Structure formats: structure tokens, C-alpha cells
């Protein structure tokens, strides 16, 4: 079956349009209601299409804010190609400030390629897969750690198995100008947006630009500059001197190579970290301690790294349950 | 009526004891159930009593972790006086990682002096007011910004109107060794724990040692050292060389002098800050912008400071509602 | 897989029986529990089978009340054929007064043809599709606007693409004697009960007989008379003089022809309508205004019709969210 | 203790101001948050103060919409006296579309005279009692039936026991120009806003201007005209010809004299009314029937009036529980 | 302030009446709604008044079922005095099968003497205290262990400090004919119904007649016979031969003498008991073990009795939290 | 697609290991979180594999406790073969004490053969079906009545249609040594764990060893002895004299032969049983009565058995809804 979502913009009309996707949603409070998903389309001179999505998770903010800044800044007359921007893709989750949709509990980045009539989250994924990605030459889905994780900022790519596609993605990542490029070399979950882009041979970049459920000023600036640099790289706009990288700072490239990069809580309680983002650690180093909440006489439970690496990600909230990710590492690889 | 809470420790027995306060709580899941609140008592040689409480709000972690570290470290044989430690005072809130109690919604720091039979939160406040504070010579209630706020760390006092009491508190604050001392000179809400301590003429210190709903390593270290410095100052333990302050760093003293120190959200949406903690601003400076979530074409709503000051506090979560505190300032005063 | 639902009535036994469908439902509160769906079967002399369903949405009442009145009135000795009545088809929704099921959130009229083991709502649809509709010659599913919409009463049909079937449905609609006949000429969602009836070549009528989440006395009387007139038309009972239509009032026939018949809220707030049900409007007319709830100084947001037509449906509750249907039109067509 | 609520407007400044009451509300999602309650103050030439409140219940809309229309229309230069308008007094309830506050469950019209620190609803009542009513000469609190009741529109007064005060209220009610004036002669619950006004000797009018949880166009027009007529009567504005009453239509005066005016559901199920608003009935007449939802074979339960009167109020939602009010009568009294 | 509750029965009318208490309850779903509490009054020849209440906790069933059996059995012509029966006193809790009220969370047996306007639970307690107990000569409030506890059945009394009153209660307990009489000699919480009866000098009996949230056949029979025996003892009815006690079985009398009778969970997990109801234990005996749910390698945590006694009460649900009562003992005392 | 679950144990390593299954679960509170399911593997000398699962429903305790006792007792040196133990298979349900998962509402015993990415419950079923059962020669899934049912203890088998498989299961059931063996001869729901075992030709036993949501001491002992007897029978361990059956007590064999073995509530209210577990009844006997909760004057509704049999199962909680199972019978068959 085909999607029931329709757009209030015309993807082909010249100039800058704003509007919404309309997802029919018949519920008690509104029998003929719709979920609305904000979007903008900017058409300039002939050229490629760049699709920008944020709000795949509703508590990741740097990409969405940067995209809204870019939308206000972009001049269709100065654009070659088309920009499609959806800064709040899982709109119910964004309005609730939640990773997952309050409507159906769906995690949009575990929902691809989607289904048209299996709940709003799957319907959004299905629309991206069947309508938006087929229009795109380039795709950037901006993430952050959300409410539960803090990230060292990076732009990322996911190995597709198609060397030409991966090379194009790596070239794009380098153009982005982030201090770190991370390659997801492990567990390519097939239900991610970038995995779907890989299947459709669309050059795609992910990235984690902050986290903790807040808006990082540095992350916003990084994405804003990064997308302009990408567009210049792809000849969609003229390169801007103020977007040049400061001094000599080629990005470091790291890879998440396996499950042993992760430290998971083995007990529930309050997690007190022993490291900071960006620290280099060796196997056996203390990652932190979990203080139990049942008996004050209990000693804290030590948690250690099982291999060497750079701390890319740390648990943010103090309270943890057994099974939560406390940290993950990545391994520096040749750029 | 008197409290129904009882302690499984003997406040007068020599040595180190751990246990719980038992608060009878008859509910569906447990007709003869109790809420348990962990506590420890350490009795050494004769001397004063220091009462330490954390977890007044269940998502403020630096004080509780530091207090549990101190509990493990302290040697009763080296102690003059008594240490009473409750690192998870509003225990149901702590176990849920929430500011307020999941049992009755109570904010423990708006519940003093409390009532014995008006719900668990009021009963805890009542026990502190009627049993614990009367035993105490000194009181330290450690806070942080919790899930919704980020704080520049400081130790604090609340003006009591009793000059001798305030001078003793200020002396204690200086001994603590925090980089900032904040005086709450505005709106002494009578329902706070430190306001109750003031009424009982107990020398008391507050403090905000981090926030964002996470465990700040710096905050934990600050409290751990601060309490040891306080105890040394009060001759409860010997001063430790490793707790000396590094170099020349007398604390800066600031005061929150009125409602004009605060910036509140005038619109709902995503708050993008324009300043960092510790920045000095002048009236009219941009505090940040709120990006609305209903129509993507709407411009962001600018929020500005209404006076000069130092940014002590910032909203943490990206999502804000009209009425939320976005930031507050404090004004430097002579130390 | 086949249905796990069983009926406590015998569909073929002569006379009037009442009972329930039993839908096994193993949940915490009842490991071997069942959801029960009330039904009645009335068998008379040989003749056709008419299936009547109400409570597809649990807050639509006119049909269900009329069907229960008809059940008490009907004399099997005076009946040719069989009457199968389910006045509370989505029984959990009916008992909760909700459009959708409190058990699984399902909207029964977006669930056809259903599945036997994918939750109660899908199981009910599956039973209708595989057991009830195959027994039926004629099908009438009575609806109303429910809690969120008010309707100008009408009997309706859905174009099937089968001219003979549509002609039979239109003849039935005329026999019904409602003041309005509405043709759903747009967006034949395949998951509706009447769409399933169309697929099975069962002559089917829908209808909206009130709304607002209340019981309309006029709507109840309209359905009660309409079904008796239908049965007389199909020679299942003798026509009754008291069911004759008053005076010269042939039904008006209208069609919902496209998405441009609908007005959707573009802002959230309180909707103040500017029209009444049954009004004739032209494109550009004011449909109403939405008063925002964040800043009292904001002007109301005007909402206008985008084409000409008759107001068939209006939003009922005062509070609206962006995306809600505020009104829809239909266009008069030759009868 | 005094209120912690503050206003962002100056009640004495000339001209038209809009803003909010700020009610400090420290909760998990916002440690230094506030509930904001929109208000407007219009100061003209010297004269009396009229206080208008709507949204005492969050699902009663006619008064609030009319007041917002009046606010936009009023010209301070043409005003003698002061107008204080709060169209969403229990703001959390209004934003949720609920009778009662989602924050503390409070029914604001069962909360007077209020308390400053016993939850938001009581704090709002306390502010009205201690700040707003003491400023007022006249008070109008506009209600409607809300989500659960439908009302024949009327302006109303509540007997105070002070003859002069009651005469002033009755004169005001006559000036209002509503088709019905209702006197609450039974059960003067002391916790209502108008009871508090009576205690403070402020001339006050209530009124029920619609209901069903929707916005009645007639009700909005009635309040808008009624308040202008009141203001003209009190010499606050010039009388407008377009606000004259049409033809000869003196208001009917009715009284709710006792508990026997009410019909309550004796069984749970679907309520099918047998009367309409405005009908005159005699004791023993059928009010309606309740159709049970457990066994389809059960007959409906008849509900009858126990005395004569005019049907002023009817249950709106189809689903009822034992104990719900199905209807109430009033008795015509000499005007 | 006086109660707003009214009764649909006349407490003084001869014969048997059934009806409800009506507690006005204005909430969103019913603006003029009422909570209804079923009651019956049976008036016979002149004589004393016996008040029977069950459903103080909504998941305790033996008393309520026995009382409804007694109500059907009793013949007013054979009664001397008055019987007032409320088998579902906290009616919202009873209808939900919960210990505490789903309306306000209230535990009715921690609510005496009650308040008229502080929520439904307090209003019910207030009505009992101010209307029902003043009419009563004798009072029996039947309890059971409810969902969380299993009890060895007993009739009980609570020491009042008034020797004559206690002697009358003990005589009544002996007349009851239960196998055990339990004296609550510890912690006379002032908020219980029987404590209120003590304050009013009404002879009162409690009792725990089963538990586990189920209906015990033995408990029902015990209460049914016990109340008939009581009534015969007080000359309200003739003694029935079939209510004679079988053989030689004088009740055992036991007392709960202090907090050391109780065993509380010190860890959370699954509680595996090591004893049965009625067992005699000595201090140090194993009460059971708690199996933790976080790490399967953890050994179970042993829980022991701290004194000798008879096991009167055991935790019922398998899942326990730290603080839950696992068992309590009573000590046999001379009868 | 294959499972995303991984085990922290090595199924082939000699000796006793404990650990968890890790089920990736990306939700708001933990973006990279996992659900952990405790398991143990014991490898001895070469021999068959016995898979033991408990906690399929989270409120059934006898099997899980016995399995944890067995785990502590078993000595790998004395074991021939492999034991795989999962005592809390639906771990989220077990930690919540619920039949069904609090994460997705899933009933694990209605989820086979499962799906890897359709929620945690289906993912667990899928892991059992694709990883665990293929390793198993014998399978025992221990159940109990849970919170809503009480059971006469028995070991059970489900007819597979494969005579050899059924004979092996019956032989195992006899070896188990339970007082009753129950054959499920009716409605072999294909979604049960033992139905999946049947499909995979794994010899499997079920069993209900208690219920009521509590831990039955007798049930624990029965399972503990039963599994040791099974293992001895299969030559995995030496038979223990203390596990011999006492005296002459061959198990009774019964069969649930059809829907007429069940009694379902026809009305809602409080269920008062008229029989005990193990009673023999004849068709027409009273099973119990349901006392309605709306009108105290209503008589109880009698519920009767429709055939002869032995009462194997009774409703536990007092409160019932129409449709709940009140009891079921089984018919004795030749052993």
C-alpha cells in the first residue's frame, strides 16, 4: 500500500516554501485529526537535492536548530539544486522532548524502511523511504546523544559494502569540517535511516553533535558550518570564507569496531563516572562506579573498560539500570 | 502529633552505624509497608554534631555521592563529635531519579517544617525538623541544578536576620573552599530546609554543586573536600594537607538580589542559549532564543537579560514551556 | 489462522437469541479472561440476512440505541430472514466511551480485514470479515461524529467500483428516508468496514447520525425508522404506516469529493466556529477562528473554507491542536 | 502567609496592558518553573472596577472567548473605571481542556477562599480572594456546562443573605439581557467564587452560557453583549444601540430550589434522554433511560423527574455512571 | 463545616431499606456527579443499634460478603434494634478492588476522624465519625489481609484505656466465636476507625478474616455466624442452634505487643516463606528468603524472626520491596 | 532476520556459569540500553541438554524459585549433559511482578515462535525458538496460576499429534512425581512455548505448581524434586533416595477436554466461590456467586458448572469482570 501522508508544499516549485507533512491520525481526541511534520523546500537553479533531517529522536537538538538557522539564511537565488529540510521528523517525539514517539512508542531510527499503516512512526519512515530518499542525491540525518548520553561531537558514516558509495561518504565527512569522523564499523542495524539510504545508494552522513538532552552551542555551530561546507563542496552554494576551518586541524578518524567498545551497567544505582569525554583509556581502566540504592552499607560497584580506545560517549543521567550503556570507545584509524 | 518514623540506628552509640529511617506507609501493594530512607551515624569523641543531607531532590547527585565517599572514609576513632548522614533524604524521589516524590508529588524543599501525617514528603520534613535538626550544631544540605538546570558550582547561605548566625554561616562558607559563595538575598521562602535551620539557629550551608541530572566529577570532589575542610575548621577532624586550596583562589562572593536576576521563557519551544555559565552580561544582552514547534516559518523568540550580572544558572533541557526559568544571574559583592 | 472468537448464540436457531461473542484475552488481571461483545440473532421465516453493527467507535451512540430498541421491538414471527445485531462491536471502546479501544488503542474502522492474533481490535475486524459478512446480504454500520465531531445526519454509501453494487446501495439509501444521502467519493480507505463489505459484494450503508459524544434523540429516531423502512423495502417485514416519510421531503444527495472539502486547524488553541451545520458557504468564507493559549495579546487565527459547499461536519470540543479537522463540506449532486 | 503569585502588569497604570500572573511552581521538569495565567488590565477615566473571570473550569468556553473579544474591542479612552480580565483563570485546566487542574486535580470553584501553599488551584483561589476581589466593585465569573453538561443559557446570582447586595445583583442580572435569570436558592456551597464575592460584599454575577465542552456561538454573543450592557448600566461605557434587546423579551426568572430539582443516574450505561433543554415537565415524567452495557438482554432503566419544572440542564456524554446528574430543573418565579 | 453527604434511606423508618450515601463529587467526567456508597438500614422493635462496615479497604472481601448475606437473611420482624450495614464503605476502592481509593489515594483506615471537604476518603471518615458512630451502640469493622497479606482469621479489639469499654469489647469478641481473638496492644494509631469508636465510647470489634485479595469461604462463614452470635448475645435476635460453636473450642487470645513482632524485608526480590500461618516460632528462626532479581549469581537473603510467637500474618505476593512486612507474630496471652 | 540478543555465557564451556541474555532496547531513558535476562548454563560430562524456563509469566514463582535452588545445588562434576536455566524468561514482567511485559504488554506464552524486531516479548520468544530449543533434548516450562488463578498442582503435557513424542512426554510426566498429570487435550494454541517445542520435536513438560501470585512452599518443593527425578530418569544425575515418592501414590491423570470444562463470569462484581480446588462436581452444581457492586438490593448471580469433573483451577481475586474464568474442571482418564 502507498503512503497516506501528503505534503502541503510542492517539491518542485521554485523558491522557498514552508509547510507540513500531513499524516492522517484518527484518534479519540480528533476523529479526522492529523499529525503534522514541519518541512521546508528550497528550490534554486538546477542541481542536486540535499535532504536534511533532524528530530529523528525528539530530544536531539543541535541539528534541528542549525537546520532552522540555515533555512532562514539560505537564499534560493544563490542555490543550485534543492534543499529539503525536516528538522522535527518524528514530530510527536520532538513536541514531547522524547527520544521515542508518545503516540506509538516508536523509535524512528529502528523503523526503516517503514510501513504505511502500522502506526505513525513506521508511516514516517515509510514516507522517507518511498518519497524523500528517492528524490535525494545527498542525505544528512543529524543526531546527538539525546537525554541519556553525552557525545564527543563527530560526523559519521556507516559502511555500506559499496566502496564507491563509502568513498563518497568519507569525502563528504571530510568536507564537513568536524573535529572527529566516526565510522560505524560494527552491527549495521538494517532499521536505521542511513542504512536505508545505503540501500538506495544515496550518499549519506550521520553524526552526533552533542547530547544530554540540551542544546549545545558548539554543536549547533558545527552543523551550521558543516552543512554550508558540504553544499559548497557539492557546488550547491559558493564557499564562504567564514566557513573555512581554523588553522591546521584535519579531523581525527575513529571507528567503533565491536561490542567490546561498550561498557554496560552490571548493577542499578547512581553512576559516578571516572573519565571524561575524549579521554584515552586502556583495557582495565576504571570507567566509573555504580552506587546502589537499597542498602547504604553496600560498596560501589566498579565498572571497567575491556579494551583500549577513546571515550566517545558517556551515560548522562545519574540513575542507571543494569543493562544501560555507561560509555563507549572508538579506535583511531588512519584518515 | 509526633512522628511515626523510627530509626534502625542509635544516634548515641559509639562508632559507625548504617541503617534506615522507617516511614510506615500503608498502600495497596503493601498494607504494612514502609518507605526506607538510608542513614548513617558516626560517633567519635565528644564534640559537635554535623548533619549532612543530600537527595532532598532525587535528581541532584554530587552531594549524595560525596557523602557516601565520606562515610566510607571516616574513621570514628579520628572523629570528634557526631556525623549524621542522609544521602537520599527524599528516598522515593532518589530511587526514581526525580526532583519530587513519586509517592505524593512532594518537593521536599517546599515542605518544611513538615507534618507527620500529610504524606511521606511532609513526614520526612517533619522528622528533620523535630528530630534531626534539634540534634545538630551544623547543617549542610547539598543541592545541584537537577534535571532541569545547570549551575556554576557554589556553596551558599540564606540570610536569617540573625547577624551572629549569618556570620557563622559565612565563615563556614569561606572554610568550605568552593570557588563561589552565593548569598540568597531574595525571597527567603519559609518552606526550605535551610530556612528551618535558620529558625532553629543551626548554622547551615546550602550549595549547588552541578546539575543537568548527571554526576559531575568536579562537584563530587568539591563537596568531598569542602566537608572535610568544614570538619577540620570545626575541630571535628584534623586538617589534611591534600585538602588545602590550590594557590591563590579566594572565593568570589555573589548575591541573588531580586526577581530581576531571572530570565523566564515567554514562549514554548526549543531554547537555544546565547551564553555560557560564568559569563558576565549586561542588561539587554541576549540570553537565548526560543524556537516554536508549531509552524516552521515562525522566527525564534529572543529572550534578553534585564540587568547586569554573572550567569550562575542555565536551563538544561532543550524543550521549554512559557514560565520556565532560562537563566539567573548573581551580582558580585565584596567578600 | 482462523479466529479464536466464538459466539454463545446459534446463528441458525429460529427465534430471538441474545448473547455474546467471546474473545479470549489472557492478561494480568485475568489469565484466562475474555472480552465479551454483545450480540443478538433473530431468525424468522426464510429470507435474507441483515447485519447491523454499531459501536465500531465506542462514543457513537445513535445507532446502538436504535438497534437495541429494534431488538426489543422485533417479533421473529413477523420476520422474513435473519437479523444479526451487534450494537457495541468494539465493546472495550464502548464500555470506556472512547473512539478507540482502551485495550490496544485500535480504531476498529481502520482495521479491516483484520487479523486473528494481532490484538483485540484486529481480531474483531477479522471475525466480521470472515464470519459475519459472509453470512450477510445487507450490511448497515451506523456511525456518528463521536466525541470530536458534530454531524448533519445522513445515511451514506461508499463507491465500490461495482456499478450494480453501488446502485443497490443507493436504492437502499433512498429507502432509508434520511434527509441527506452522502456519497464518499474521495479517499476510499481500504481499512473501513464498508470497504470490506464492498470487497465481499455485500450491499452496505454507512451513515453519521449525530455526534458530539452524546445521544441525539433525532438521530436515534432516524435510525430506528430507517432500518424498519429498509427491512420493509427488502421484504423482511411489512411496511408500517407510521414509518412513512412526512410530506414531500426527498433526500438531498451530497458528495465529499476531495481533500479541499476539509478545513484543518493551522494553529492550536480554542476554536470558535463562524458557521453552523447545514450552512452553505463559498470559498474564502470564514470557517472560524483559533484563539491561542500562550499569550493573551495574540490575535485569533482565522480559518477559511477553500471551496464552496454545505457544512456537513464541525469540530465539537473547544480545544484544538494543529492538524485537527475543523469542518468539512459536501457538494450537492443530482439525486 | 501571603501569596507567592505576582503580576506582570501594573493594576494602576493607565491604558491597556496584557500579561500574566506568575505562580512559582517547582517541579521535576522545571525546578524554577512558573504556571502563567494570562490577564489584562484596562484603566480608563476614574470609575469602578469590574473583574471578569473565565476558565474557572478549563472546558467552559463562551465567557473566555467573549472576554477576549471584549479585550480587543475596548478602548481605554472610552472607559470609565477599570476592567480586569482573566479568561483562563485555572490556566493549567484551560490548556488541557479539562474542568479540573491537571497539576493537582483541583476544581477551582470548590477551592475558595484558597490557600497560598496548598497547590496551584488553591493558590489561584487565594490570589482572587486576597488581591483581585478586594480591588473589585463588580465581579462576573462566566461558566458553562463544560464537557459533561448542556445548559439552557442564563445569567445567575447566588443568594447572599444581604438584601441590598442581592438586589444589586438582581438588577445587574436584568441589565445583562440574558433570556433567563437563574437564582441559586439551594445549597450555597461556601467554596464557590461567587460565594467568596458575597462574603466580600462585591456585587457578583455567575451564569451558564452553553456547555457540552464546545464553543456556542450564541453563548459568546450573549456574554459579549451582556458585559457591554452591564458596563453601560454601571456607566463605565456608553450604551450602544446595537446592544439593545430585540423586541419585547424580558428575561424569565427561575430558581433552583432544592435537591428534588435534580435527576441522578441510578444505573450505569448509555443515557438516552427523553426531553430537551427548555422543556416543561411534571413530576413523574420520563427524563430518559439508561441502557446497561453488560448484558444485551437487559431492559433499559427508566429515570423520571420527581417534581415539576423547566429543564435547565442535561447530561451531555452518552456514557453515565451511577451518581451522575442527568438533568436538573428550575422553577419559574416572579421576576 | 458539616458533611455534604446525604443518605437516600431514612435511618428511623421501620423495616428494611436499601440505598446509598451520596457524596457530591464534581469532576471532569461529571460536573454534578456523586460517589455512591451502598447502605442498608433495618429497623425492628426498640433496641440497640449495631453498625457494620466492610470495604474500608476495597480488597478485603469476607466481611462484605457475609454482611450482604446477613442483609438478605435478616427479618425486621425478628429484630430488636437497628442494623446499619455498609459493606463497601470506601466504595471507589471496592469498585476498583484496591486497598486505597482510586479517587484520592486515601487509605480510609488512616483517615479518622476525617474532614468534610478534603477529598472523598476523608469525607467518608467524617460521615462515619459525625453521623454513623453517634447512632451506634455497637460497631464491627470487618477487615482481611487484602491483596498484600494473608491472615490467620481472628476477631480483634484495640485497647482504649477505658477498662469498662475494653471489657465490653472482650466479652463481645468471646461471643463472636472466632478461633482466635487478637488484641492490638501496640501502636494504637489514632487514625483508625476503631480508634475513633473508642474515642466515642462505642463498643467496637475489628477482625481479619482472610486476605490474599480473595474471598475465603471460611472467613465468610465465620463472620456470618459471628455477627449472628453477637446479635443474639446483645438480645437483638434469638440465638440459633446452628450458630452454636462445635465441641470444645474456646478461642485462643493473642496480643501483638510491639514492633519486634514484625519481620520486614531488608532486600527487594522474590520472597520465599519458610513458615506457614499458625506456626509457632522462636527468635532466630528463619522466616523466609528474598531472592534478588538483578544478578542470578546472588545468594538469597535470609530473613529471621527476632522473637518467639505465633505467625498470624504473612506477605502474600511473591514480589517484595525493602520495607515490606513479611510476617508478624502475636504472643498468646491468658484468655 | 536473525536475533539481536546475545548471551554473556558460553553454552559449551564446562562447569557452571551465570550471566544474562542481552536484548538491545533503545528507549528514551537509555538510548543504548539493554533488557537483561538472567541465565545459567551448567555443563558436565557428555549427555543430553535440559532447558528449564520459568518466569514466562512474571507472577508465577514456584518454578523460578525451585530452579534457582537447583542451580545452587547442582555440581557440574556430578552432571551428565547440560542444564540451561532461565528462571525469569520474561524478565521485565518478572521484575514488575506482572503476567505480561510492562515494556510492550506482551504475553510471552502467546508469542511463539516470535519475531526478532517486533518488541521485547516477541524477541525473547524468537530467541527461545531459534537458539535455545534447537540446543535442547528436553524442555520444562514451569507455570503457576499467577495473580488471577489458583491451581491444584500438576505437571502437564500438550498433545502434539506425534505419538512417540507424546509417549516420551507422558513417561517424563510420570517420572516427575507430581500428584496430578494434566493433559491439555483441547485448543492447542499454536503460540505457546510447549507448542513450539512440539513443533521442534523436543520432549516438553509444562505444569502449574501453585498460583495466586504468591510463592507456594509445596509447589517449590514439588518442582525441585520433580526436576531432580527427571534428570535421574534421563541419566543426567544419580537418583537420590530422598527424592523417592512417599508410599503408594501414583499420579492421577486428568484431561481438559473442551470448552465445557470452563465456567466464566456472566456478570461483574465480587466472586464468592462455592467449591474448593480438588472438589469433584457434577453438571449443574453451584460454582459460586457474583455479587454486583452497583445496587446493594440486587441478588447475587449464581454460576454453575455445565459438566462433571474435578476442580483444577479457581479464580483468585475477589473482583471479577464478565468474561473472566471462574473455574475449570478436568476429567480423570486412565493413567
Image (tube, coloured by chain):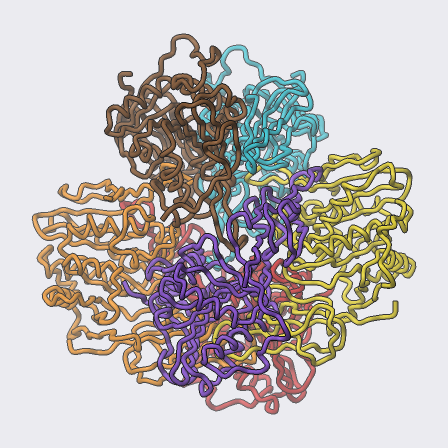
Chain colours: A orange, B red, C brown, D cyan, E yellow, F purple
Determine which quarter of the picture holds residue D327: top right
Asked whether residue B164 is in view, the answer is no
Which residue is drawn at the image coordinates 62% and 20% (left, top)? D310
**Looking at the image, is C74 positioned above or below residue A291?**
above
Instruction: From the viewer's perspective, tell me whether residue E295 is left or right of residue C184.
Output: right
Which residue is drawn at the image coordinates 29% and 76% (left, top)? A329
**Looking at the image, is B220 positioned above or below residue F279?**
below
* Residue that lies at the very extreme toward the front in this rendered image: F334
Determine which quarter of the picture holds residue A63: bottom left
Q: Position of residue A141 (x, y in %)?
A: 23, 59
Asked whether residue E54 is in view, the answer is yes
Q: Where is residue A10 in the image (x, y as percent from the top left)?
A: 18, 41
Name the foreground residue: A126 vs E143: E143
Quarter holding the C terminus of chain A is bottom left
Quarter holding the N terminus of chain A is top left
Q: Position of residue A67 (x, y in %)?
A: 24, 55
Amino acid at each position: 500500500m502507498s503512503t497516506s501522508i501528503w505534503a502541503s508544499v510542492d517539491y518542485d516549485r521554485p523558491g522557498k516554501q514552508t509547510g507540513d507533512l500531513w499524516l492522517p491520525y484518527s484518534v479519540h481526541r480528533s476523529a479526522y485529526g492529523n499529525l503534522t511534520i514541519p518541512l521546508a523546500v528550497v528550490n534554486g537553479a538546477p542541481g542536486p537535492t540535499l535532504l536534511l533531517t533532524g528530530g529523528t529522536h525528539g530530544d536531539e537538538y543541535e541539528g534541528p536548530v542549525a537546520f532552522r538557522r540555515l533555512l532562514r539564511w539560505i537564499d534560493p537565488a544563490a542555490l543550485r539544486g534543492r534543499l529539503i529540510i525536516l528538522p522535527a521528523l518524528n514530530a510527536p517525539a520532538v513536541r514531547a522532548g522524547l527520544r521515542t514517539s508518545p503516540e506509538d512508542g516508536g523509535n524512528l531510527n529502528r523503523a526503516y524502511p517503514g510501513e504505511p499503516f502500522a502506526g505513525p512512526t513506521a508511516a514516517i519512515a515509510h514516507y522517507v523511504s518511498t518519497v524523500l530518499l528517492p528524490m535525494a542525491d545527498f542525505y544528512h540525518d543529524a543526531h546527538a546523544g539525546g537525554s541519556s548520553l553525552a557525545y564527543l561531537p563527530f560526523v559519521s558514516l556507516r559502511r555500506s559494502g559499496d566502496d564507491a558509495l563509502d568513498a563518497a561518504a568519507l569525502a563528504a565527512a571530510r568536507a564537513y569540517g568536524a573535529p572527529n569522523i566516526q565510522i560505524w564499523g560494527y552491527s549495521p542495524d538494517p532499521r536505521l535511516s542511513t542504512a536505508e539510504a545505503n540501500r538506495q545508494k544515496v550518499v549519506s552522513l550521520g553524526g552526533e553533535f552533542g547530547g544530554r538532552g540540551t542544546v549545545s552551542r558548539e554543536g549547533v555551530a558545527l552543523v551550521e558550518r558543516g552543512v554550508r561546507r558540504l553544499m559548497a563542496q557539492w557546488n550547491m552554494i559558493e564557499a564562504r570564507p567564514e566557513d573555512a576551518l581554523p588553522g591546521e586541524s584535519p579531523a581525527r578518524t575513529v571507528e567503533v569496531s565491536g561490542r567490546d567498545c561498550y561498557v554496560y551497567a552490571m548493577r542499578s544505582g547512581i553512576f559516578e563516572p571516572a573519565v571524561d569525554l575524549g579521554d584515552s583509556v586502556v583495557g582495565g581502566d576504571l570507567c566509573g562506579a555504580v552506587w546502589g540504592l537499597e542498602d547504604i552499607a553496600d560498596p560501589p560497584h566498579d565498572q571497567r573498560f575491556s579494551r583500549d580506545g577513546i571515550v566517545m560517549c558517556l551515560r548522562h543521567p545519574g540513575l542507571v539500570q543494569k543493562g544501560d550503556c555507561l560509555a563507549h570507545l572508538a579506535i583511531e584509524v588512519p584518515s
